[in-house]
Amino acid sequence: MARLAFITGGGRGIGAAIRAALEQRGCRVVAPARADLDLAEPAAIEAYLKVHGDLPVDILVNNAGINVLNPIPAIDAAAWQAMLQTNLTAALRLIQAFAPGMAARGWGRILSVSSILGVVTREQRAAYSMTKAALNALCRSAAVEFGPAGVLVNALAPGYVDTALTHQNNTPEMLAAIQATIPLRRLARAEELAEVAAFLVSAENTYLTGQTILVDGGFTCQ
Ligand SMILES: NC(=O)c1ccc[n+]([C@@H]2O[C@H](COP(=O)([O-])OP(=O)(O)OC[C@H]3O[C@@H](n4cnc5c(N)ncnc54)[C@H](OP(=O)(O)O)[C@@H]3O)[C@@H](O)[C@H]2O)c1
């Protein structure tokens, strides 16, 4: 039977590419829109899980994320809470909801879309970097806890991808300068991330777990 994949932020950007890659490989994909599952609102997550929490999810992809830029002195409580809730707490909540079922069935794959900025950083990215670093830690912990039951858990850490998020937070001049420092001299296409994601959550991945996989055109190796 086709595996059931659940993906957040599957409507556009990297999430849409992962969704398409999983569908091409024969998965059934549930990708709730923000109107049905607003990850920034804990009450909305609980309401969604009350109805859909027993879906027999085989593959969970925590992809949705936001990156609101602020220098450290300007990170107020509301900005921090929004980043923490959307990028980290929502992923934890979905792992809590769906990983025990995977473990009970003896097979599962969990992938969280992190960022190279969870490993390195840049000005105005403190809040984002903190949430992504913690997401990497959550992946390691989940890999340890659910590994014995056949559930493999990883974080996929993109570099600079050609999506709305990248263009929202970088001027064309900044992007030109960034591309000049990437060994492959270009941004990634979302489909390139999706190929790696599709492998990580597949049955072909039998031994890779608990890792943060950097896919950045070589940016962070310099
Ligand atoms: N682009 C990059 O260069 C890059 C690099 C490293 C990491 N990443 C990470 O990759 C992931 C996807 O990024 P992207 O570039 O594809 O971003 P994007 O184009 O901005 O898309 C973000 C997706 O997340 C969804 N989302 C955001 N807040 C949400 C909320 N409160 N509830 C439900 N859905 C929400 C959006 O839904 P709506 O359509 O409803 O807005 C959208 O589908 C993020 O976790 C991001 O941090 C991106």
Image (cartoon, rainbow, N blue to C red):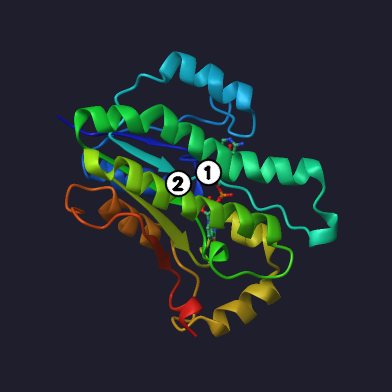
Residue at 41% across / 54% down in the picture?
Answer: 155
> Label 2 sits on what residue type?
Gly
- Residue 75 location in percent, x, y? 80, 52
- Mark 1 within 8 Å of ligand 1, using the beta carbon: yes
Q: Residues within 10 Å of mark 2 (few under 14, many from 20)?
A: many
- Residue 89 location in percent, x, y? 57, 38
- Mark 2 within 8 Å of ligand 1, using the beta carbon: yes
* Label 1: element kind: loop
**Residue highlighted by disc 2:** 15
- Residue 81 location in percent, x, y? 71, 41
Q: Is residue 104 left or right of residue 60?
A: left
- Residue 179 location in percent, x, y? 56, 79
Instruction: Please tell me in which quadrant of the rendered image residue 40 appears.
Output: top right
**Residue highlighted by disc 1:** 64
Image quarter in which the N terminus is found = top left
> Label 1 sits on what residue type?
Ala
